Amino acid sequence: MNNYKCTYCGTVGLVDGFIEDEGQGTHGYARWIEGALERGPFGGAKRMGRPRRQIEAYRCPQCGHLELFATAAV
């Protein structure tokens, strides 16, 4: 447990977790990519040269609300 506070109900002590990504060619976890979504000619997201950050996820044990944070660049 930690001292993070739920922004929805105010409970202190959120549960650590992560957001899984099972898409083709993924590394098993989701990342936050800076900038608006732009699609390439085949429909995929343009990511080249954009900063990427791992997502930390915390769940409130009381109400189930998720708090997501983008960490340092990966």
Image (cartoon, helix red, strand yellow):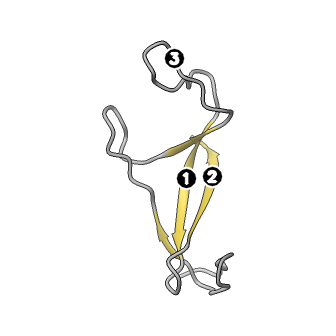
Name the quadrant containing residue 52. Answer: top right
Q: Which mark is residue 71?
A: 2
The residue shown at (46%, 46%) is 30
SS for callout 3? loop
Q: Is residue 3 above or below residue 48?
A: below
Counting residues from the start of the chain, the first of labels 1 and 3 encountered is 3
SS for callout 2? strand
Q: Cα distance, mark 2 to mark 3? A: 26 Å
User: Hey, what amino acid is under mark 3?
Assistant: Gly
Q: Which mark is residue 40?
A: 3
Name the quadrant containing residue 66. Answer: bottom right
Q: Nearer the viewer, mark 1 or mark 3?
A: 3
Q: Residue under label 1, please give it.
A: 55
Q: Cα distance, mark 1 to mark 3? A: 24 Å
**Front position in the image: 2 or 6:** 6
Q: Position of residue 32 (x, y in %)?
A: 58, 43
The quadrant of the image that shows the C terminus is: top right
